[in-house]
Image: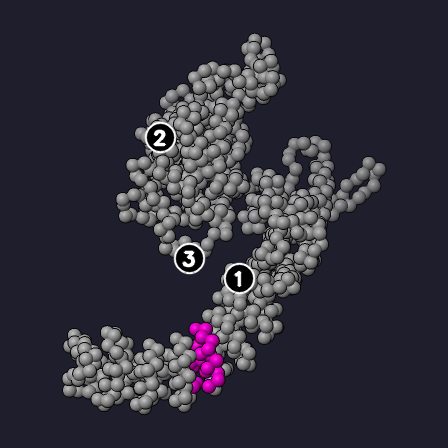
Amino acid sequence: MERAMEQLNRLTRSLRRARTVELPDDNETAVYTLMPMVMADQHSCGSVECLVLLLKKGANPNYQDISGCTPLHLAARNGQKKCMSKLLEYSADVNICNNEGLTAIHWLAVNGRTELLHDLVQHVSNVDVEDAMGQTALHVACQNGHKTTVQCLLDSGADINRPNVSGATPLYFACSHGQRDTAQILLMRGAKYLSDKNGITPLDLCVQGGYGETCEVLIQYHPRLFQTIIQMTQNEDLRENMLRQVLEHLSQQSESQYLKILTSLAEVATTNGHKLLSLSSNYEAQMKSLLRIVRIFCHVFRIGPSSPSNGNDMGYNGNKTPRSQVFKPLELLWHSLDEWLVLIATELMKNKRDSANITSILLKQKGPDHQDATPTPSFAAAGTEGRKELTSDAGESKTYDVAGKQEACADCQDVISMTANRLSAVIQAFYMCCSCQMPQGMTSPRFIEFVCKHDDVLKCFVNRNPKIIFDHFHFLLECPELMSRFMHIIKAQPFKDRCEWFYEHLHAGQPDSDMVHRPVNENDILLVHRDSIFRSSCEVVSKANCAKLKQGIAVRFHGEEGMGQGVVREWFDILSSEIVNPDYALFTQSADGTTFQPNSNSSVNPDHLNYFRFAGQILGLALNHRQLVNIYFTRSFYKHILGIPVNYQDVASIDPEYAKNLQWILDNDISDLGLELTFSVETDVFGAMEEVPLKPGGASILVTQENKAEYVQLVTELRMTRAIQPQINAFLQGFHMFIPPSLIQLFDEYELELLLSGMPEIDVNDWLKNTEYTSGYERGDQVIQWFWDVVEELTQEERVLLLQFVTGSSRVPHGGFAHIMGGSGLQNFTIAAVPYTANLLPTSSTCINMLKLPEYPSKEILKDRLLVALHCGSYGYTMA
């Protein structure tokens, strides 16, 4: 090859000097070696001159290289008009195919070299020559969108409907790449709308690629395809975002087209909704289809010429505009939904009355001696009784069909089981349609009225199948007034399910997962200095785009090359330690020595509120990206994040003795003690003691037995909230930039700690070794043995819950259980005996790390009662 290159260079020099040069003795070798270089003009050697010299020396113009390409192929590929002319002059064969079946005409079509094509087609015997896949030059020109090339080929007699080996026509190829202009040329010239051998149509390809403009052209020439696109919204194999993209483009063409699309989507949604309400239909398929269509409908509605944010819609201001009329077809579905719910409510009410009647009958059958001796029998047990006879005071004999009523009750429950999910999916669709008519942030009054009307039935659905909340009742997260009705049910659901729901909605609307690993833009990298990580991070995060930070974080330390998730994790770990660094005076250590509380005197740092906002951003970002932080806060601070009111027990984290005093006030009658307390307290304000009223005129209001609970709550709020309100507000401002309040309220303060800081490892042997027993228990007692057996059987998550239940913290201090702190210093984990009564749950005194464990008669009952207490929020905290 080096020799060939030298020969080419010599040839170049000789041509420039008008001198001859010696070529290889073997002409075939010369052509094979030099021709590709000449045609590519790799050395700016004057390809035409070199070509002429080679041809004059007898080079074969139709010689094929190892890939089957001739010089004409190469000239066509590189767009060398003069070379092509010379080759044709020397009788180059334009019909020769390379190893892939491509002719020179294919190369010109691929690259859109129309001028050269005009010259070449005059020498072509068959303009529809096919490559190995049966594709003609027209196929590839249409695919690449070369308009003038397509017109030239058609003018030269190219077959406009010629299929390739898979049955794909040139129109098919144009649509596969969204080539609107070439598709329009073909349709204007009479191209047929044909599918390939697999039944895939040009419209299918346009929708799959989201090519709205090309779809518009197809519909222009084939209007029937409009309804085909509408029906495609039911096809779950098509990507929803591509369908949205197509319909969004079509809706922008005119107001009438926009209204036509919406009305058609509403009609299809109504049909699907009624199919879903039919118990004979496939629930999963119909549910997905309905919600998919409604999502697309709402998307198109929002991007229309009249935006809900301006209030131009019936749902918001009651004006029956043409735009609002697109919802009219859906009213049939909403009416059916309402009828179903009313019917179920009627049956539920009827069954309640029947149950009461049956219970009354069964109790009277037992006679007065047994009426109060045993609980009401179950319906199942009474089901075999058949027809019961009851004598009235008048002596008449009346017959009641008890079994029949019980069967009716069971039938009603079966109907609920069969319809709950179906009706809930339609409710979700109803909510989406109501919401898209409202300005951002407002809840539809119509939907609120609907939920209130059917409150009992919806709660019945949720109680029977709580997963309905996560599957269909997404509206709860956006409607605080509705969330409050279901919050007790939501929080009773497994922590894992709520976590999945939390992240599903937190990341809703963000780019697809395949976009997450896109290359990082250099401008989006957070460049921080390791020696001033807190201040430099605060500066770059405050300037960064919030939306981009939600999608992904890239961190680089100044002067270091490392990047990636390992660096991000290190950044969060260092920052979590810096946030509680005493140098910044943002947080103070609580009484337990392991948790932190906002510093009421943080204003000694002039930037303290900016730093608190930054601390909120970091914790919000960490939670958003599932990164754990190495920092733990007091229970009261987690409550502030969640919007949960603090209580007097939370005072123990900052002042255990004061918390005991408040507990004593609540537990004792203070009427005759002469405490002379008023609704004002003295507190330290920048080193000086000041009297602060707990309420207006508090200094003149005495604390009495009647109002002492109010006093304790107000004192608690002063110490735990009012004293640090600016700090809390600044922190929440940063936190809520990444975590919406509506989502975080799914958790309690214990679960929030686990979300932020993870689940610690617990050494059961160390726990057992450092546990004390009191109130009658000893290490060798049977109940204690059962307790530790149960602890061994618990999952890691359940052990953490148990530790939280008793100590108020999910963490074991450095050094193990021997270093657990109580209200007055070191305090071992303690188990105290409590007399057993049926269904009694364990309770705890968190200030002294005490578990009050009833003397259960068996290990099974102990485990059951303990798990109920841990999982159902029965914390039962008391103060020692």
**Circle 1 SS class:** helix
Q: Amino acid at mark 1?
A: Gln
Q: Which residues are magenta?
A: 127-156
Measure the alpha-carbon separation of dots 1 and 3: 18 Å
Q: Quadrant of residue 109?
A: bottom left
Foreground pick, 527 / 582: 527
Q: Residue at x 35, y 78 (%)?
A: 79
Query: What colour scheme was applied to this rendering of the protein?
Result: one colour
Q: Residues within 10 Å of mark 1 (few under 14, many from 20)?
A: some
Q: Residue at x 52, y 40 (%)?
A: 741
Q: Can you give x and y, in whole percent of width and height, for residue 405 in the image?
A: 71, 48
Q: Can you give x and y, in whole percent of width and height, for residue 83 in the image?
A: 31, 82
Res. 721 visible in picture: yes
Q: Which residue is mark 1?
A: 245
Q: Where is the N terminus found, in terms of image quarters?
A: bottom left
135 drawn magenta: yes
- The single residue placed furthest to the right in the displayed view is 394
Q: Which residue is mark 3?
A: 514
Foreground pick, 404 / 196: 196
Give whichever of discs 2 and 3 has the lower sequence position.
3
Q: Amino acid at mark 3?
A: Asp
**Circle 2 SS class:** loop
Q: Can you give x and y, in whole percent of width and height, for residue 114 in the image?
A: 42, 79
Q: Is residue 217 left or right of residue 67?
A: right
Q: Is residue 240 left or right of residue 341?
A: left
Q: Residue at x 52, y 37 (%)?
A: 872
Measure the alpha-carbon separation of dots 2 and 3: 39 Å
Foreground pick, 492 / 692: 692
